[in-house]
Amino acid sequence: MGWKIVAASNTPAHDWEKDGKEVTGVLLGKRSGVGPNKSMLYELELPDGSKKAVWGSAGLDGAFLAIAEGQEVKITYKGMKENPKTKRQFKNFEVAVNEGRA
């Protein structure tokens, strides 16, 4: 068995402040253990054919457990929210799946 070269993804990450509060696309893949924080990274193909990556978070990771590759998903950034127990701020998202798309 030989060595296989694995290229890093150069898909740009979605910036919720600069790129807009919503992103819609088809889920192309999920990668775990990415970056210094060992985060999840979700790659989407947008309606115009371009690709965007979305960094995972506790809320997004939970929602994406129920989303399969090939499904169309819409992620809406709802702003910062405070955890009532820890009082820490976190990014709050709403995630929806297009049930009309096979």
Image (spheres, rainbow, N blue to C red):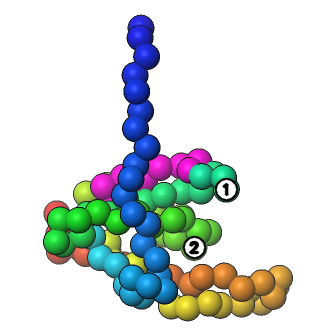
Residue at 60%, 52% in the rendered image = 35
- Badge 1 marks a residue whose secondary structure is loop
Q: Which residues are magenta?
A: 27-34
Residue at 40%, 22% in the rendered image = 4
Residue at 48%, 58% in the rendered image = 41
Question: Foreground mark, 2 or 1?
Answer: 1
Labelled pair 2, 1 in contact (Cβ < 8 Å): no
- Badge 2 marks a residue whose secondary structure is helix
How far apart marks 2 and 1 lie (CA) works out to 16 Å
The quarter of the rendered structure image containing the C terminus is bottom left
Percent of width and height locating residue 64: 45, 64
The quarter of the rendered structure image containing the N terminus is top left
Is residue 42 visible in the rendered image? The answer is yes
Height in image: 24 above or below 10?
A: below
Asked if residue 20 lies in the magenta stretch, the reply is no
Which numbered circle lies on residue 69?
none
Q: Nearer the viewer, residue 102 or 36?
A: 36
